[in-house]
Amino acid sequence: MINIFVTYRCNLACSYCFACELQKEFREDLSQERFQRLLDWITRAGMLAAAFIGGEPTLHPHLPDMVEQTAETGVAVVLFTNGLFPTELAHRLAPSVSNFVINYNEPETYTQGQWELLHRNLDTLTELGARITFSKNFSRAHSRYDYLLEALERYKIRSVRYDISRPGAEGKNDHFTLSDTREVMSRIVGFVKACERMGVGTGLDCSVRFCDMKDEDRLYLERVSAKFTGVCHPSIDIHPDLSASYCLPLNGIRVPDVTLFNDEAALRWYFAQEVRPLRLENVSASCLDCKDFMRRCQGGCLALQQAQGQTTPEPERQKDFRNE
């Protein structure tokens, strides 16, 4: 699945967001002409799914048309949204969207009006029979999840996408560092177990470092949490000018025009080659000595490695946590 960033404008200012920094570079939304060129490429390449994302994609004035046109080609549409859109838009989007992935933050981060609108839209989408997945981003300031468990039960939602916060290109957002990962992974294990008890499926959005977990926790997450891995792959984030990045935290690894590639496989191969040197550039000595390195684990988020410039092992990283 590719990610189409139709706009970088947003009606929230989440502290952990790594996309907001790109508002300065991409001030214009995806134009209708460029969207048509992109849609032609998507269908020609035989892609099965496409995600509309932002920013807040529902701020794009032509989003409903784009979604409908994409769905009409047989491509499954996934919409990533904060849920703060005019309620009448839910009726327009629901027939064409195969999955609404709704970022659900702590109640105190919303105004009263935003909180009421979010739940009005959740009520409406539920009544329409739309598939809803909640999204949870764990950051230093946003590690609670009790409120999310309550909402899962209230709306009978059975899937959650989760991830740890990653650094933006400038590293100014609220994100965990490599040295923090051990603590947050312990909390995530508790979150996934709570979801499993409720019959809720979970899926990791990116990769994590295996030695930040005990073996029993890693084996548990590998068993119950979809896409749980220690190695990342290109997310293919397409910007409004049709350039595309390996992922937003590594947005500098970019092609100028995604439609110049024959298909998704060719694009993924290109990105895989471009990122290969980075996989070895900032890893610790302990990673290089690990039997799992570059087989099942890459030593942590590449963006975090790059941001921290980790070329020597940190003292607290010398002992492998998995066997404690």
Image: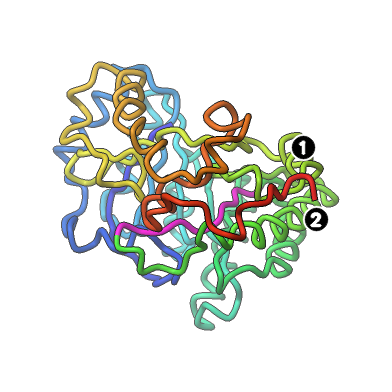
Task: Please state which of the two labelled residues, at mark 1 or mark 2, is closer to the viewer.
Answer: 1
Where disc 1 sits, the SS reads: helix
Residue 243: where, in percent of width, then height?
20, 39
The stretch in magenta equals 160-169
Q: Is residue 130 left or right of residue 168?
A: right
> From what the image shows, is residue 177 above or below residue 108?
above
Tell me the amino acid under the disc marked 2.
Ala
Q: Are marks 1 and 2 in contact (CB under 8 Å)?
A: no
Q: Which mark is residue 292?
A: none
Q: Where's the N terminus, which quadrant?
A: top left
Label 1 belongs to which residue? 219
Nearest the camera: 117 or 91? 117
Where disc 2 sits, the SS reads: helix
Nearest the camera: 28 or 124? 28
In magenta segment, residue 163 = yes
Label 2 belongs to which residue? 194
Q: Residue at x 82, y 51 (%)?
A: 198
Residue most toward the right?
197
Residue 44: where, in percent of width, then height?
28, 17
Tell me the amino acid under the disc marked 1.
Leu
